[in-house]
C-alpha cells in the first residue's frame, strides 16, 4: 500500500460515498466483506471529516494504514480510526469482521463520561483472550442495528458505551505497560498539555509555559522531545492547527473569524501558518470536505 499526498486524499462520508449520511442513525454498522469485496478487497486511502471508525478484524489478515503507519494484522484486532485521519485498508479474501462508523456528535456524547476519550488517537489493539467478549459485543451491535425493535437506540448506545469502555481500558493498559513508573518528566509534560489546552489561543512563548511549570524552557523542550517526540513549539502549533481544522470543518465561521478566534494578528499570517502545517490553504481544506 503506497502512501499518497494529503492534497489528493478524498473525503468520504463512508467508503467511497460522498452523498448524505445513509441512515437516520448516528452510526453505521456493516461487515468487512460486505464493503471490501465490492472494491477487490482494497479500500483506497481516504478520510472522513465527521466520523470515527472502529474496524474489528475477527479472522483472515489485513494491512491497515492510518496516517502513514502500516499495521500488518494476522490476529484478531481492533483498529481505531479518528476523524480526519487518512486511512486505507487491504484485506485477505477470507477476512471476517465488522466496521462500525460513529458520527462525531455520538462519539462526543458517549465519550464525555470517560476520563480520557478513547477514540481521539489512532491505535490498533490486539484482542488476545478477549475475542469471545468482543465477538459477542459486535454481533449484538450488528443484530440490534439491523432490527427495528423497541428501545433500539438505547440498546445501541449501551452496547457502544461498553465497547468504548473496552477501548479505553485497553488504551490505558498499553500506556501503563509503556511507562510502568511515571516520572517527574511525565508529570511536567502532562502539566504542559493541560496549560496548552487552556492557553493555546494566546500564542504564549515557551518560556511562559516553562515558568508556570517551574522548569526552564530548555528543560521543557527536552522533555517534549524525549516523551512526545516533538518540540514544545511543534506541540503548540499542532494544537492550533487541530483547532483550525475543527473550525473549518464543523463551523460556518469565515476564515477571518477562525483567524481571530485562534489569536492570529492577521488572516494572511494564519493562512501561511495553516498551509505550512497542512499543505493546503484554509479555503482549499474547507472545500475538500
Image: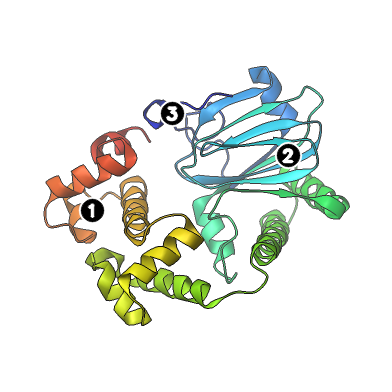
On screen, residue 198 versus residue 129, left or right, reads left
Query: In which quarter of the view is residue 159 placed?
Result: bottom right
Element under label 2? strand
The answer to which of marks 1 and 2 sits earlier in the sequence is: 2
On screen, residue 124 versus residue 189, left or right, reads right
Crowd rating for badge 2 (residues with CA inside 10 Å; few <14, some 14–19, many 20+): many
**Residues at marks 1 and 2, CA–CA distance in whole angstroms:** 38 Å
Q: Position of residue 32 (x, y in %)?
A: 72, 32
* Residue linked to disc 1: 258
Above or below for 267 versus 168: above
The one of 226 and 176 positioned closer to us in this rendering: 226
Q: Residue at x 72, y 60 (%)?
A: 166
Q: Nearer the viewer, mark 3 or mark 1?
A: 3
Query: In which quarter of the view is residue 236 placed?
Result: bottom left
* Residue linked to disc 3: 9
Element under label 1? helix
Element under label 3? loop
Kindly identify which numbered label has been placed on residue 98.
Answer: 2
Amino acid at each position: 500500500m503506497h502512501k499518497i499526498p494529503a492534497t489528493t486524499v478524498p473525503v468520504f462520508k463512508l467508503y467511497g460515498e460522498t452523498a448524505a449520511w445513509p441512515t437516520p442513525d448516528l452510526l453505521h454498522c456493516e461487515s468487512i466483506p460486505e464493503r471490501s469485496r465490492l472494491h477487490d478487497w482494497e479500500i483506497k486511502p481516504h478520510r472522513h471529516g465527521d466520523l470515527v471508525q472502529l474496524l474489528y478484524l475477527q479472522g483472515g489478515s489485513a494491512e491497515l494504514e492510518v496516517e502513514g503507519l502500516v499495521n500488518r494484522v494476522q490476529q484478531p484486532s481492533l483498529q481505531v480510526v479518528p476523524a480526519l485521519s487518512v486511512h486505507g485498508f487491504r484485506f485477505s479474501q477470507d477476512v471476517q469482521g465488522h466496521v462500525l462508523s460513529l458520527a462525531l456528535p455520538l462519539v462526543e456524547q458517549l465519550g464525555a463520561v470517560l476520563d480520557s476519550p478513547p477514540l481521539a488517537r489512532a491505535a490498533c489493539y490486539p484482542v488476545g483472550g478477549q475475542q469471545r467478549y468482543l465477538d459477542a459485543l459486535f454481533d449484538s451491535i450488528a443484530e440490534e442495528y439491523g432490527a427495528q425493535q423497541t428501545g433500539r437506540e438505547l440498546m445501541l448506545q449501551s452496547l457502544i458505551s461498553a465497547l468504548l469502555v473496552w477501548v479505553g481500558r485497553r488504551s490505558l493498559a498499553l500506556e501503563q505497560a509503556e511507562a510502568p513508573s511515571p516520572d517527574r518528566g511525565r508529570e511536567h509534560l502532562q502539566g504542559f498539555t493541560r496549560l496548552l489546552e487552556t492557553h493555546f489561543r494566546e500564542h504564549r512563548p515557551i518560556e511562559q509555559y516553562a515558568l508556570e511549570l517551574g522548569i526552564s524552557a530548555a528543560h521543557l523542550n527536552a522533555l517534549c522531545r524525549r516523551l512526545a517526540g516533538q518540540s514544545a513549539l511543534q506541540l503548540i502549533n499542532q494544537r492550533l492547527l487541530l483547532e483550525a481544522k475543527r473550525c473549518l470543518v464543523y463551523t460556518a465561521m469565515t476564515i477571518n473569524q477562525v483567524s481571530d478566534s485562534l489569536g492570529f494578528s492577521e488572516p494572511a499570517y494564519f493562512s501561511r501558518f495553516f498551509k505550512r502545517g497542512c499543505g493546503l490553504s484554509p479555503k482549499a481544506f474547507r472545500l475538500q470536505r
